Image: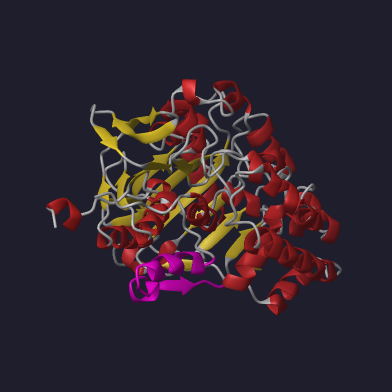
Amino acid sequence: MSEADENPVKSRAIVIGSGFGGLAAAVRLGARGYDVTVLERLDAPGGRAYVHRQDGFTFDAGPTIITVPFVLEELWELCGKNMHDHVDLRSLSPFYRIRFDDGSHFDYSADIDDMEREIARFNPDDVAGYRRLLEVSERTYKIGFEGLVSVSFHSVWTMIRVLPGLVLTQFQRSVYGLVSRYIKHSKLRMVFSFHPLLVGGNPFSTTAVYALIAHLERRFGVHYTIGGTGRLVSGLVDLIEGQGGRLRCDCDVREILVENGAACGVLLANGERLDADIVISNADSATTYKNLLPARYRKRWTDRKLRRARYSMSLFVWYFGTDRQYPDVPHHMILLNKRYRSLLEDIFERTELTDDFSLYLHRPTASDPSLAPDGCDAFYVLAPVPHLDADVDWESKAEPYRQLVEDSLADTVLPDLGKHVVTSRTLTPIDFRDRLRSVKGAAFGLQPVLLQTGWFRPHNRSEEVDNLYLVGAGTHPGAGIPGVLSSAKVLDEVVPDPVERR
């Protein structure tokens, strides 16, 4: 037997980007026998789930809310391992404290009795409506998540076949419109419609299919990973390397190479060419088509179509540590502005930055003191802001805007905050564009509106060239950790089995 017969060459897969979608894709392809290389342009893996460490504090850069643990557990199982032997996942209760402008609050949890008591404090008549809303959310979950989230929409007939089921979800409505059918109190309508903001959508225009998130959270819970979300990233990298795959950081992909109508590798910014049998892009989908795949190969996702697409909002994020603790602040808190619809219109429709905001405040040290020095707290706070179509000079605006956020927190839930901040860093829409390579600095890629959902979204199997596949927030099914992990699962359906060449 020759040496070549003894050492067959596996089919090669290149994954562009090491966000959750890219890492999950690499694990799944490795489990099927592909020789996988993951390329990351930053100096460490994670993408939006990058980890910042400074002055003794650890900050998860992006995702902090873990739901649907089984989509993660499956990845460890593919490698013959139990995730819980490697990752300490803790369930949280309440999921969120939602604080209103007048100082009142709503604790959002999985317990129906507790939820009904919270609702009754605002409007007893909405308890019955909440029960009906839960029924709709569960039905939508069964149709939209169990039935469709891991299904490829590469054929328009797939969309046509699922339309009868989607009608049952009232998909033509917005999330806010659906909630308003069952909930009458204005504050409670905010409580039960804010979820699209977690995946880059405007509750007033995001398809009501996303109402499934309420059932998804109630059924599977909201969790936190001890050590931070970055612990999941490092765990997935360990799985890939255990399969014989590779992660290469500081590798900036300049172009997806095409021969005979099929992706055949990538060209790096340093001039190095890497050949592959298939290419998977976990880059922002608009960036994949606008910047990585040359225009001559694109028929559907042309520059004109990408310009006309509707993009998510961006985010202003302030990471900070304090030399004292704030024990009254829960792990997750949402501070809602008295303006709801009009503020969202400023952000999504008028693309105008105003001096008022709603905030998401993350205090991971409420559950995991290891992320800060003794006696200290680690935080990040984010404000949804317009993407870069807005006329905002973030170079000069970032610090004044951060100060506004600090003042607001000091006036509400973090007294004397300015006296206790000992470490600080910010992330603006410019960083989403330049560091994370997201078109318009949109934090979540394409908005989850009806005509950018399912078949209308960039497909997991590229419509433009063969052997190119997409995962991540910008493809089907969409943003959020369950969504991007499920986009990798779709590859099991559309990527052919590897072929060993001797």
Relative to 152, is 250 on the left or the right? Answer: left
Please indicate whether residue 155 sits to the left or right of residue 241 in the image: right
Quadrant, the N terminus: bottom left
Q: Is residue 267 visible?
A: yes
Q: Residue 90 versus residue 189: which sits nearer the camera?
A: 90
Q: Quadrant of residue 96?
A: bottom right
Please tell me which residue lies in front, 422 or 154. 154
Instruction: Point out residue 186 in the picture as x, y percentages from the top left corner.
Output: 79, 54
Asked if residue 175 shows in the view, the reply is no
Q: Is residue 80 magenta?
A: yes
Compared to residue 399, the image places residue 163 above or below, namely: below
**Left or right of 233, for residue 90:** right
Q: Is residue 320 above or below residue 356?
A: below
Q: How many marks?
A: 0
Q: Quadrant of residue 255?
A: top left
Task: Check if residue 87 falls in the magenta segment.
Answer: yes
Magenta region, residue range = 68-93
Residue 319 point in image, percent of width and height: 40, 49
* Residue 465 position within the rendered picture, expressed as x and y whole percent measured from the top left: 48, 33
Reply above or below: 3 against 395: below
**Residue at the image point whose x is 38% and y is 55% from the top:** 29
Find the residue positioned furthest to the front.
Answer: 1
Q: Position of residue 369 (x, y in %)?
A: 36, 68
Residue farthest to the bottom? 113
Q: Is residue 116 above or below residue 64?
A: below
The residue sitting at 35% across, 51% down in the picture is: 499
Which colour scheme appears in the figure?
secondary structure
Q: Residue at x 28, y 61 (%)?
A: 243
